[in-house]
């Protein structure tokens, strides 16, 4: 009897110790600080408001501190611009909400502030709507090389409707974005564009119209619809030193205007014409 009691006490002791060990081994429910990483996980979230990012100049909010910011409601910038990001390592999750206004930029990552260069690698903008501005997103990354988009600006899952240009960027990775603009959908250099949809709409005869205008970039799985463009000479892809793959253009004008050292592989164009540059440029419609 004594032996059984001793064994039971020993078992319960081990079980309790193991239980404590198991409890202590559970991961923390508090997420780490920092921006959203490649897996899409959130760090500690900062609500974007007048306290965390007060307005300055024409901007309704200016972010000057690194971190992961999130919207909890729409932003109406009126006749001004929306959000300016002046810090590196910032994630701004629109959380399905809308930044709207009639000013110059919806979201801006500036190359300079006044006359001072701004170093802003590691910027992510995602998951929401930007409506009404002259340019939806203006993002010029600086300080990490001209041929890499890995440390630059990441634009993901955005719906943009602008009055002139949807996105103008350098060293950007643009994925799963829907853009509607009358002049240029995406104007990007040293960038990667993947899985996006662009629509030209409106009367833009006063400008050179191109849904995508790039240099030194890579484009894939992207669809351009110019059926609502009122321009007499709209262009779909107007590119130089760029690889375009598995993408398509629908509507009139020129489908693919391939400059020097550009290749379009596995692409479809229902446009009236395609232009292929003289130097190492090829168009292969093979799907």
Image: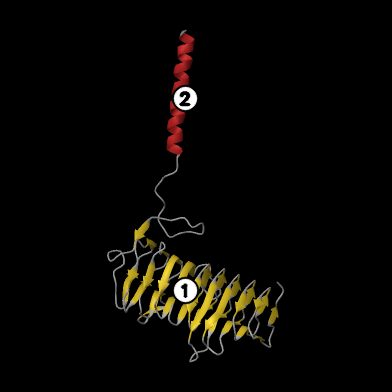
Residue 117 falls left or right of residue 276 = left
Q: Residue furthest bottom?
A: 206
The way the protein has been coloured in the rendering is: secondary structure
Residue 175, position as x, y percentages in the image: 53, 68
Dividing the picture into quadrants, the one containing residue 23 is: top left
Give the x, y percent position of residue 4.
48, 12
- What element does badge 1 sit on? loop
Image quarter for residue 58? bottom left
Mark closer to the observer (2, 1): 2
Residue toward you, 15 or 256 = 256
Q: Helix or strand or loop: what does disc 2 sit on?
A: helix
Residue at x 41%, y 67% (from the top left corner): 88
Q: Is residue 117 visible?
A: no
Q: Which residue is mark 2?
A: 14
Q: Which sits earlier in the primary sequence, circle 2 or circle 1?
A: 2
Q: Quadrant of residue 89?
A: bottom left
Decide if residue 197 is in sight here: yes
Mark on residue 82? none
- Which residue position is annotated with label 1? 143
Residue positioned most to the left: 51
CA separation, marks 2 and 1? 57 Å
Tag 2 and tag 1, C-beta contact below 8 Å: no
Residue placed furthest toward the top: 1
Q: Position of residue 227 (x, y in %)?
A: 55, 80
Q: Is residue 135 left or right of residue 197?
A: left
């Amino acid at each position: 009897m004594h032996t059984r009691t001793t064994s039971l006490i020993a078992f319960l002791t081990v079980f309790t110790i193991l239980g404590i060990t198991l409890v202590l081994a559970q991961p923390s429910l508090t997420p780490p600080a920092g921006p959203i990483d490649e897996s899409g996980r959130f760090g500690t979230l900062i609500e974007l408001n007048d306290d965390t990012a007060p307005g300055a100049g024409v901007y309704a909010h200016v972010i000057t501190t690194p971190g992961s910011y999130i919207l909890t409601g729409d932003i109406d910038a009126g006749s001004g611009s929306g959000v300016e990001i002046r810090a590196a390592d910032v994630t701004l999750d629109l959380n399905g909400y809308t930044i709207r206004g009639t000013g110059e930029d919806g979201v801006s990552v500036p190359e300079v502030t006044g006359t001072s260069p701004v170093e802003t690698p590691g910027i992510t903008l995602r998951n929401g709507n930007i409506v009404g501005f002259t340019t939806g997103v203006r993002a010029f990354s600086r300080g990490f090389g001209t041929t890499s988009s890995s440390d630059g600006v990441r634009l993901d899952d955005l719906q943009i409707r602008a009055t002139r240009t949807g996105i103008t960027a350098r060293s950007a990775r643009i994925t799963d974005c829907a853009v509607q603009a009358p002049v240029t959908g995406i104007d990007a250099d040293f960038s990667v564009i993947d899985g996006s949809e662009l629509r030209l709409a409106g009367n833009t005869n006063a400008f050179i119209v191109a849904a995508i205008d790039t240099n030194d970039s890579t484009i894939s799985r992207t669809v351009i619809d110019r059926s609502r463009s009122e321009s007499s000479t709209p262009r779909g892809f107007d590119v130089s030193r760029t690889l375009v793959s598995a993408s398509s253009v629908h509507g009139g004008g020129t489908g693919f205007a391939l400059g020097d050292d550009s290749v379009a592989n596995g692409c479809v164009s229902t446009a009236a014409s395609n232009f292929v540059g003289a130097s190492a440029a090829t168009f292969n419609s093979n799907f």
